[in-house]
Image (cartoon, rainbow, N blue to C red):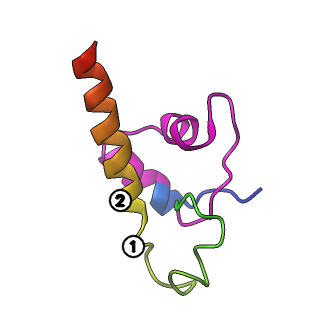
Amino acid sequence: MTAMRRSAIAKLKQSGVTRYAYVDYYFGPGATWGGDRCGCVDDRCIGFHHDQTQECGCLQGWIDELLINRCSTEERG
């Protein structure tokens, strides 16, 4: 298991999403983080989607998906 970088956790926080909510949404309630250090849910992101020193371009999309679906669920009540 790979730990998520502080920069990814900070980006989640800026978006109003906790690390635990993010992990629960993508890996299931009570699961542990199974994605890459950059915050992408794809555990092969670094080296495949971007280099080690580059910011992950995937993370914001995953956050947006969670927020959109969270809002949809809340609206349905």
Q: Amino acid at mark 2?
A: Gly
Residue position marked by numbered label 2 in the rendering: 61
Q: Residue furthest top?
A: 77
| Element class at badge 2 | helix
Which residue is painted at 32% across and 24% down in the image? Answer: 73
Q: Quadrant of residue 45?
A: bottom right
Question: Does 56 sit left or right of 51 as displayed?
Answer: left
Q: Position of residue 76 (x, y in %)?
A: 26, 17
Characterize the local packing of mark 2: few (<14), some (14-19) or many (20 or more) Cα atoms within 10 angstroms. few
Instruction: Tell me if 56 is positioned left or right of 65 in this view.
Output: right
* Residue 2 x/y as whole percent: 72, 60
Relative to 65, 20 lies left or right: right
Is 15 drawn above or below residue 36 in the view shown?
above
Q: Magenta residues, as a range?
A: 9-38
Number of other residues with Cα within 10 Å of mark 1, as a class: few under 14, some 14 to 19, many 20 or more: some
Q: Position of residue 6 (x, y in %)?
A: 52, 58
Specify the quadrant of the image occupied by residue 58.
Answer: bottom left
Q: Is residue 7 magenta?
A: no
Q: Which residue is mark 1?
A: 57
